[in-house]
Amino acid sequence: MVGEETAVSIVDGELAAKAAPLIDKLVADQVASKLAAGDATLWGSGAEPEASIRLSWTTLHKTSRPLIGEIEALREQLRGEGIDRVVLAGMGGSSLAPEVITGTEGAPLTVLDTTDPGQVADALAGDLSRTVIVVSSKSGGTVETDSHRRIFTKAFEESGIDAASRIVVVTDPGSPLSELAESEGYRKVFLADPHVGGRYSALTAFGLVPAGLAGADVARLLDQAAAVAQTLASDDADNPALRLAAAWGAAHADGAEKVVLADAGSGIKGFPDWAEQLIAESTGKQGTGLLPVAVEGPEAPGFADAGSDATAVAIGSAARGAKIATSGPLGAQFLLWEFATAIAGRLLEINPFDQPDVEAAKAAARALLDDPAKLEGGETPSTVDGSVEIFASAGVSGEGKLLDVLKEFLDSAPEHGYLAVQAYLDRLDDASASLLRAELAKRTGLQTTFGWGPRFLHSTGQYHKGGHQNGIFLQLTGNAESDLEVPDRPYTLGKLQHAQALGDGQVLTEHGRPVLRLHLTDRAAGLAQLVRAVQEVGE
């Protein structure tokens, strides 16, 4: 795998011609070598303070090497004690990279990047006597991750297990979590490089520790990145990072502000979901950016039939409809896409290292949690149809049968707009909800994204508020069969999940975007009813 060629092919001849002068300019400006050297001036004076403390990811293939021995030693210790089940509590960059790494290698890892009580309860139902939980949070204060830590601590203690011996922490130096870990005597603390942002952290402790403990060969991952690092740092027209960034930049200048991502036989599992966060948070701001649309495959609606507003990118071999194709092993792809995304930020004239709009939804959710009456009793549905309660924002009447409301909502999308489906549900037990993406894309012709809440808040959530303001938002929430208390907190997981959905919807509405929330009073029946309605759209 280390020797597999890492390359970018611009399949579309017209796009290649438009990208060529951008590539020449990037080469002349020595952008690749300056980026590899940590030059924080590449994105202008406004971005320089942030960029100056966010560029250590370019050398992680070297600086992360000492982690390998530490991870292997801890894994052997745990296995010697009969502990071989790894649960990861993390959000965004703390969970997406480990999920791709372990999925690609077939290493078992239970990922908790949810506040759905049912999904967390399923993770708790595993054999705790064999379980270690990796609590990953760059800031050390991520509310979802802290909730998971509290819930698992209580579960360990109630099972007669020393909780501290089963908690491994990955965080930045000096964070509240690192201080807590020291005071509580947690099993091991891995301090990540603070000069790497979360979405660029695949090759830091955030990506390597949980994946390595689960059994993935993370040393090989670093070898793959190291093998391509010199190429990505070269001021050469064949540099794949320059080619990928220039193709995105040229397409965006032509009105293609969406990048449709499909795996085309790469052997990498779930790469589009990881790339989604990297691109959306890095570029979606100041009313511009690239909206990543992760689809089911090269034949999926939105890829093979991508219109002028979208650029289809195949991960793997060039597939039908692909305008760009990228190849290479996972470690190399991580570094390639990070370089390309940072360079695309220069072309789009934005700072690829900040996320100015992420905090808004968090603040709105906190305000709702502080006002239980508003959270629990202040909502009245516009109408109820079977197992679906309908809540519509201004501009969508929300009246009538589900099908009628859905049609009116979808008709509110502007030309070249997009539809975002946001499911605050259990991504295991309610997995069928993800089928809605392809069905809606096929019937509406809209580029359609699908995200599990609150996971997407740490990913495409930035683009939704800061990028091109032409999206419409379909939220799915649902009653849970049972809830979970969060120890020493005045809310349950269910209330937190509900507050996150309402808070994000509130912020989107304040941005003038149409939001339709469908609350499933019976999740299975409600999803079935929604699927039937979607299948009638466009008939």
Image (cartoon, grey):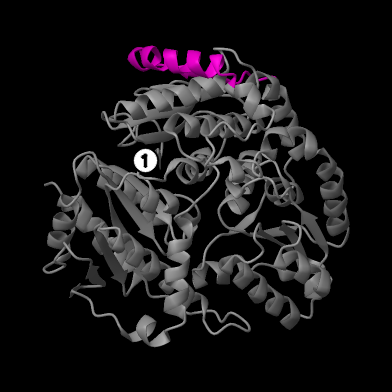
Residue 182: in sight, yes or no?
Answer: yes
Taking the image as shown, residue 133 lies to the left or right of residue 111, namely right
Q: Which quadrant would the N terminus be assigned to in this image?
A: top right
User: Percent position (x, y) of residue 69?
Assistant: 87, 44
- In this picture, is 509 found above or below 285? below
Report whether 330 appears left or right of 153.
Answer: left
Give the total number of marks visible in the rendering. Answer: 1
Query: What residue appears at the point 50 percent right and 19 percent down from the top-left corner?
Result: 243
Q: Which residue is mark 1?
A: 288
Is 14 inside the magenta-drawn segment?
Answer: yes
44 or 181: which is nearer to us? 44
Relative to 114, residue 73 above or below: above
Q: Quadrant of residue 514?
A: bottom left
Residue 403 is left or right of residue 441, and the answer is left
Q: Secondary structure at mark 1?
A: loop
Residue stretch rendered in magenta on the structure: 3-30
Residue at 19% in and 40% down = 415
Corner quadrant of residue 395: bottom left
Q: On screen, 235 above or below 268?
A: above
